[in-house]
Image: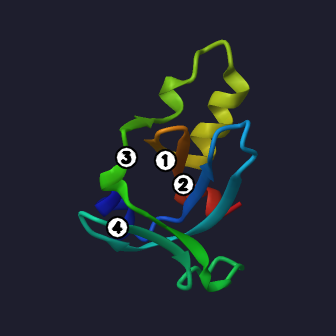
Amino acid sequence: MLRGWRDEKRLIQFHISESRAAGFTCFGLGLIEELTAEVLRIDSRNVTVDISLGQRYGCTISLHRADRFEVWDWRNIPPEDASAKKLLRESYDMILTAAFGAARCVLQAMNDDWLQK
């Protein structure tokens, strides 16, 4: 999945947070610039969608240290939450969450259609 996102130059929104009690969270947007068995690096140096921010805006994640992974998309949203389901379907292709103890890293692959809006 990550190789596909890299090869397609899919815009990735990332959200990294510690536990809610710790109050740590950060967001960013970029492309997968490095993907190995050890490292996933996302940054915005090659983003051309009205936000060329440079390499200093990004994140590096050691996926091999994750405790577990969850993959989901709009089909995982219950039918009774139709507005969230519609928003997710229109905005994101798929979502990958990596858990590192109490910390979470959420990677959201933006839909190509979203870029046209």
* Image mark for residue 66: 3
Give the number of marks. Answer: 4
Q: Position of residue 100 (x, y in %)?
A: 45, 44
- The amino acid sitting under disc 1 is Asp
**Direction from residue 101 to residue 114 in the image, left or right:** right
- The amino acid sitting under disc 4 is Val
Q: Dot 2 surroundings within 10 Å: few (below 14), some, or many (20 or more)?
A: some
Residue 114, above or below 85:
below
Q: Which quadrant does the C terminus fall into?
A: bottom right
Q: CA distance from mark 1 to mark 4?
A: 22 Å
Q: Where on the picture, by quarter, is residue 78?
A: top right
- The amino acid sitting under disc 3 is Ala
Q: Position of residue 90 (x, y in %)?
A: 62, 44
- Mark with earlier residue (3, 2): 3
Q: Nearer the viewer, mark 2 or mark 4?
A: 4
- The amino acid sitting under disc 2 is Asn
Identify the residue under disc 4: 39
- Mark with earlier residue (3, 1): 3
Circles 1 and 2: CB atoms closer than 8 Å: yes
Identify the residue under disc 2: 111
Q: Nearer the viewer, mark 1 or mark 4?
A: 4
Tag 3 secondary structure: loop
